[in-house]
Image (cartoon, rainbow, N blue to C red):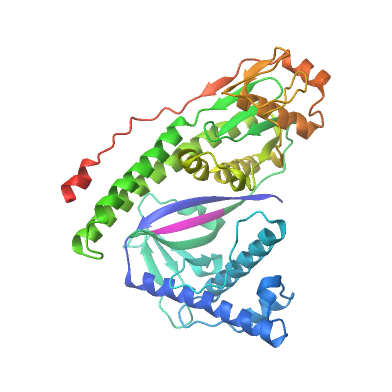
Amino acid sequence: MPSFYRSQTLKIEEQPIFSVVRSASADVWNACCYQMDMYQWQRGYPHAHRDFYFGKDCEGWIDKRLSNPILHSQSRQAVRERYFKSWKSYRAIKKNGSGHNPKPPNKEKEYMTTRWKKSGIRFVEGTLFGKRVELSLAQGQPKIDIPLPSNFDTSKAEHIATIDLCYNYGQWTLHFSYKYETETTEIGQEVVGVDIGEIHPIVSHDGQDTHIYNGRYIRSLYRLRNKVLADFSQTISRCKRHSKRWWRLTRRKWKRIRKIDNQIKDAVHKHTTKFVKYCHTKGIGSIVLGDLTGIRKSISYGKRANQKLHQWAFGKIAELITYKAKTLGIKVKVIDESYTSQTCPSCGNRKKPNNRNYTCKCGFKYHRDGVGAINIRTKYLGHFGVPVVAEMGSTRMTPPLGFRLTVPKVQVALSQIKECS
């Protein structure tokens, strides 16, 4: 039966055991690195890391040799699984050449996020101390007791999959992951093509309607983030490293950056949720995304343009659309989007648009990103570059419909930096 995951983040107060556990997870990772070298050496493969070779028995062989006096056995296995997942990702990137000089996961760590699986998690409620979650450690070690807010929904405890203990710039958080089973439902046969852009994160076409999700608010947040980071860094550079003033400014900097990052995350979630809900209401059965893998390798448009494109979170948008669509039973496909923004849907002529509008010599005029979404859909259906089919669709196309986020005005208070100067 198909399944999907939901996540929840909860801020918690620091406990002395947290740093000990993070360090213990890093020790397990470092042990994996050492045991991998021993495994390769015993089998006579001194260059196995370069040649991406490890046998089918490698994971089990290393797992038997891992031990830690602090971590729960399932937490140790989670580190080992993450280690081998990193190796497999590295091997895949090296084979298809999609990454720029990737590095193998053989670097030792000092701290690492700790994960607990279902067997090491216990929710407690109805006591004098309120709602709590207990996270198990190794045999003989006391459990980590963490209080939960009174409004925490413990009815979802039966669906718990994992809990991660994370540290982010001075703030400790618990990341809850819940697994749900989905019922097999009948989905529609309609197909929608999606062009993921930097200015407009989502532009979709379902055969008749074109929807453009405006992303200029997200771009403004990235510009604000860059400005705040530059201003704080300039002020901090004049301070003595690790001085009281240096730490005060550093904490303020990351507090401000975290707030902007949360605003960006919220905006992207709102856009993707609105789009997936529309597809579900319209009876869409398949969402087709353009593949942008490796697009950053060939870009060189100047310092400012390159900064925008390298901060372009197209992978995150595709990930959010994929998992949200999966919860509703909608399939997501990824295809090559080469020349989809340059080909005229009416006559099949190919030209590069000079601005946001695409104008062809045959008289066809439309939004450039809308043309990309139309051609991604027709390419998936096997009609890409066929003028007759494209012309029949163009006569029924309606003008693009835009969606803009309703957000409060963002006021930049950089005077706080000067106050600390």
Is residue 45 placed above or below 131 in the rendered structure? below
Above or below residue 60? Residue 318 is above
**In the depicted view, which residue is nearer to us: 222 or 279?**
222
Question: For this rendering, which residue is in front, 180 or 50?
Answer: 50
Q: Which residues are magenta?
A: 173-178
Q: Is residue 419 left or right of residue 300?
A: left
Give x and y (percent) for residue 228.
Answer: 32, 44
* Residue 414 position within the rendered picture, expressed as x and y whole percent measured from the top left: 25, 41
Which residue is outermost to the bottom? Answer: 42
Quarter-of-image position of residue 413: top left
Q: Quadrant of residue 348?
A: top right
Residue 308 appears in the picture as rendered = yes
Q: Residue at x 71, y 37 (%)?
A: 338
Q: Is residue 317 magenta?
A: no
Above/below status of 35 relative to 328: below
Residue lying at 60% horizontally and 62% vertically, measured from the top left: 102
Expressed as whole percent of the image width and height from the top left, the position of residue 315 reads 58, 46
For image coordinates 57% across by 23% down, the residue present is 355
Q: Main secondary structure of the magenta part?
A: strand
**Picture mark count:** 0
Q: Is residue 189 visible?
A: no
* Percent coordinates x, y for residue 32 in the rendering: 57, 77
